Amino acid sequence: MGAPRIDPVPDRDSAHYWAALAQGRLELPHCRNCGHWTWPARPICSWCQGENLVWEPVEGTGEVHSWIVTHQPYGPAFVDKVPFTVVLVRLDEQRDILIPGPLESDVNVTQGLRVRAAPERVSDTVGLITWKTDAQDNG
C-alpha cells in the first residue's frame, strides 16, 4: 500500500522541479558562479547570492537523514494508507541538500539507509518523488 498523495501547486520558483519529476528526472538549481546546488528553489544562490543558476539533473541518490512514520490519517484519503513513512534524504551531490518524500514499501528505516529517487508522473507539469532502497529493486 503506497503513501497517500497530495499534489503540489507549482509556483514561479518550483515549477521546473515539479515538471522535471513529471518527466522522470530530479533536477535542482546549480550555481554557475560557485558550483553550489540550491534547495529549496529560489532565484539566487543560497551560497554566494549569485543569480547565475541553471537547472541541472542530479543523480538522485543519497541517504536517509531523518524520518517519521505517520499513523494518524489527516484526511479521508489517508485512512487506508496509514501507516506510511516519510524520509528526509541527504543527497550525494551536496551534504546540505535535503529532499523529503515518502519511502516506498515497508522497510526497516535507519539513519544512513541508502535510497534513490523514483519520480512519478502526475500530469504533464507535475511529478512527485518517492524514495526506494536497493533492496526494493531486487525484491
Image (tube, rainbow, N blue to C red):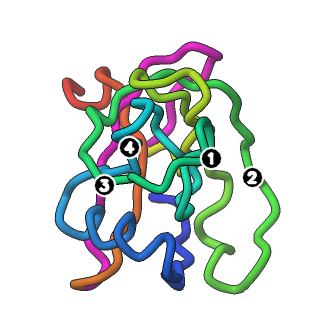
Residue receiving disc 3: 55
In-front residue for pair 40/24: 40
Mark seen at residue 30: 4
Q: Of callouts 4 and 1, which one flags the residue occurring earlier in the amino acid sequence?
A: 4
Q: Quadrant of the C terminus?
A: top left
Residue receiving disc 2: 70
Q: Residue 100: x and y, percent? A: 58, 47
- Which one is closest to the eye, mark 4 or mark 1? 4
- Which one is closest to the eye, mark 2 or mark 3? 3
What residue lies at 30% left-to-right and 47% top-to-bottom?
118
- Residue 54, quarter of the rendered image: bottom left
Relative to 88, residue 95 above or below: above
Classify mark 2: helix, strand or loop: strand
Residue type at the position of mark 4: His
Q: Residue 49: x and y, percent? A: 60, 47
Q: Residues within 10 Å of mark 4 (few under 14, many from 20)?
A: many
In-front residue for pair 90/49: 49
- Residue 95, quarter of the rendered image: top right
Residue type at the position of mark 2: Thr
Mark seen at residue 86: 1
